[in-house]
Image (cartoon, rainbow, N blue to C red):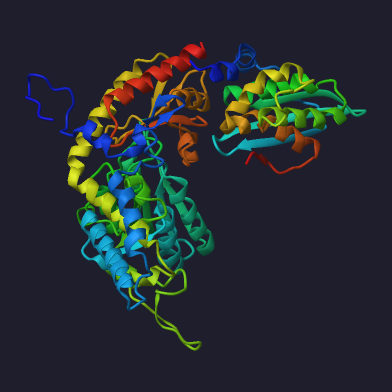
């Protein structure tokens, strides 16, 4: 789409959304008799044809176990799995592919770090710092680790807009801090956390920083070396890849110092009943047969996103976000929860007199999929004094027409509940 | 607007959502329990005062969506003054109705029949039954919070 500036500029960014939509077979589905309007991308994204085909092709032609057989298929499967790791490395600009650990998803990645990095190091009196806008998966693993060690969980508050209180972060991150675990983008509010700034504060005190990138990777170009963090985690299914596969990136020296967290095949060097020695990272953390097909599909998804370009995606989504904010604020009784200056792709809202669940049901009847509830971020809901919100979350294939459908659907709910 | 949606959100449902009956703390109660719908984070507390095998009074607090709140409100009306022995039977009939397992008969449910439209919305069954499960727990004197899952 080439638009002459100053003459007619309908949307910033140069994404050909109509063409991109054609890449996603499910977007042609009808739901409850209406064309699907999928606005639940924060929960999971849809899959492009190339990813679906890659999974089928892998199982049709290459399927075998990795790092085991001498036969041709095992070599092909191993090559594909290793290539997927290299793709993830390039995607995050990691220094080495050995820093990429395949996991089931962000939750498993955080649990791995909490269990294998944090638990052996944490002692009574130590502190683990999180933010008030974390998903439960970036709270509970740290609570468990703190409980086991007698360490303390410290929470950096957010302001009324849903932005991180950096002034508080400066006070709360200190000499007792061992780990700072922050989300990159809040799943409930859309706020972008200034990760580089948090890293600077944490490193000043020698603390290690883990970033939960689940909501970020499909919206923001991530360069782990530029961010300066120590661990970065994301889920494949939130970036157009399959479910069941995700990535933990960790700095090589940190991974090398971590004991295994699950025992089994593929994570060992030698096994005897007297003494087992472990493989080097990343294999040390990948016990058992991995999700090879998933990794192959994820790599194709990452390449798909890279080919479109995250800067173009971000520009398109910012335009959508601005448009959605404007349209929704025009609806009487609607309040947007999360109004940070720096947001990515998420509009969380409440409507006076209508519970988010009822909004969700009415919208579903119109073929519009959103999320309603606490978004696995109950502390965030408590912070704003609500039990839940309705949340529309955008992806590269969403258009202004989707936003119009959403606004019309909400208006139809307000009429029904009038 | 679809017919299913109109059937789900009938005027009586809206009436009980916007003006819930018996929505207050019950000072004198023989049983009470808290219920929690993990899907949406909604919470409800149900109090019931039983004497001589009769539900003398019943009240609730909390609720949540239109379906959960209306259902709680209608429930209190349906069981107040009834023998405790009937409560379980009504709950069973109600549950069969909202899950579509009563073949559309839902005989004898009276006003509760207004929630029959829930059967077309399986994701909302938990909303419709939260107060009922909580009531059930209260009568069993179960001190643990109820989770509709």
Of A206 and A366, nearer the camera is: A366
Looking at the image, is B60 positioned above or below residue A149?
above
Q: x%, y% of residue A8?
A: 11, 19
Of A397 and A276, nearer the camera is: A397
The quadrant where residue A2 appears = top left
Of B11 and A294, nearer the camera is: A294
Res A218 visible: yes
The quadrant where residue A82 appears = bottom left
Of A34 and A364, nearer the camera is: A34
At horizontal 13% and vertical 30% (from top left) the residue drawn is: A1
Task: Name the outermost residue toward the bottom.
Answer: A274
Q: x%, y% of residue A227?
A: 23, 52
Task: Name the outermost residue toward the front.
Answer: A60
Res B23 visible: no
The quadrant where residue B124 appears = top right
Q: Quadrant of the C terminus of chain B?
A: top right
Q: x%, y% of residue A317?
A: 25, 33
At horizontal 70% and vertical 24% (from top left) the residue drawn is: B104
């Amino acid at each position: 789409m080439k638009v002459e500036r100053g003459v007619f500029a309908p949307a910033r960014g140069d994404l050909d959304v109509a063409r991109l939509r054609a890449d996603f077979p499910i977007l042609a589905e009808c739901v409850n008799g209406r064309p699907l309007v999928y606005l639940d991308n924060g929960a999971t994204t849809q899959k492009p044809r190339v990813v679906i085909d890659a999974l089928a092709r892998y199982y049709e032609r290459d399927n075998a176990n990795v790092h085991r057989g001498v036969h041709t298929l095992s070599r092909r499967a191993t090559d594909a799995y290793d290539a997927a790791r290299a793709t993830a490395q390039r995607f995050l600009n990691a220094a080495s592919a050995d820093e990429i650990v395949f996991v089931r998803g962000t939750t498993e990645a955080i649990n791995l770090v909490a269990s294998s990095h944090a638990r052996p190091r944490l002692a009574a009196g130590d502190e683990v710092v999180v933010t008030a806008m974390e998903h439960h998966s970036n709270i509970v693993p740290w609570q468990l680790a703190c409980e086991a060690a007698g360490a303390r969980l410290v929470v950096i508050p957010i302001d009324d807009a849903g932005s991180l209180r950096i002034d508080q972060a400066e006070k709360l991150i200190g000499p007792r801090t061992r780990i700072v675990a922050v989300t990159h983008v809040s799943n409930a509010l859309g706020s972008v956390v200034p990760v580089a700034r948090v890293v600077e504060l944490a490193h000043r005190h020698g603390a290690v920083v883990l970033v939960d990138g689940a909501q970020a990777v499909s919206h923001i170009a991530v360069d782990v070396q530029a961010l300066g963090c120590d661990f970065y985690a994301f889920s494949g299914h939130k970036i157009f890849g399959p479910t069941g596969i995700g990535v933990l990136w960790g700095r090589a020296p940190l991974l090398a110092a971590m004991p295994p967290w699950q025992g089994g095949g593929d994570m060992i060097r030698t096994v005897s009943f007297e003494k087992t020695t472990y493989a080097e990272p990343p294999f040390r953390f990948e016990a058992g047969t991995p999700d090879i097909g998933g990794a192959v599909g994820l790599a194709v998804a990452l390449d798909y996103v890279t080919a479109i370009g995250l800067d173009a995606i971000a520009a398109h989504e910012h335009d959508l976000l601005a448009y959605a904010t404007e349209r929704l604020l025009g609806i009487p009784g609607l309040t947007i929860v999360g109004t940070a200056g720096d947001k990515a792709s998420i509009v969380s809202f409440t409507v006076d007199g209508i519970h988010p669940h009822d909004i969700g049901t009415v919208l579903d009847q119109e073929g519009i999929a959103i999320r309603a509830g606490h978004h696995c971020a109950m502390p965030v809901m408590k912070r704003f004094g609500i039990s839940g919100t309705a949340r529309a979350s955008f992806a590269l294939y969403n258009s202004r027409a989707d936003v119009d459908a959403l606004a019309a659907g909400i208006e139809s709910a307000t009429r029904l509940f009038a | 607007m679809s017919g299913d949606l109109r059937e789900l959100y009938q005027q009586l449902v809206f009436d009980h959502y916007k003006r819930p009956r018996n929505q207050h703390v019950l000072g004198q109660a023989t049983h009470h329990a808290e219920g929690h719908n993990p899907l949406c984070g909604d919470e409800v507390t149900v109090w019931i005062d039983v004497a001589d095998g009769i539900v003398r009074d019943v009240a609730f607090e909390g609720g949540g969506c239109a379906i959960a709140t209306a259902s709680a409100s209608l429930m209190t009306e349906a069981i107040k003054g009834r023998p405790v022995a009937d409560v379980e039977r009504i709950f069973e009939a109600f549950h069969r109705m909202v899950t579509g397992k009563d073949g559309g008969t839902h005989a004898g449910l009276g006003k509760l029949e207004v929630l029959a439209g829930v059967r077309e919305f399986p994701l909302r069954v938990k909303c419709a039954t939260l107060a009922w499960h909580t009531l059930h727990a209260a009568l069993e004197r179960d001190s643990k919070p109820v989770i509709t899952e």
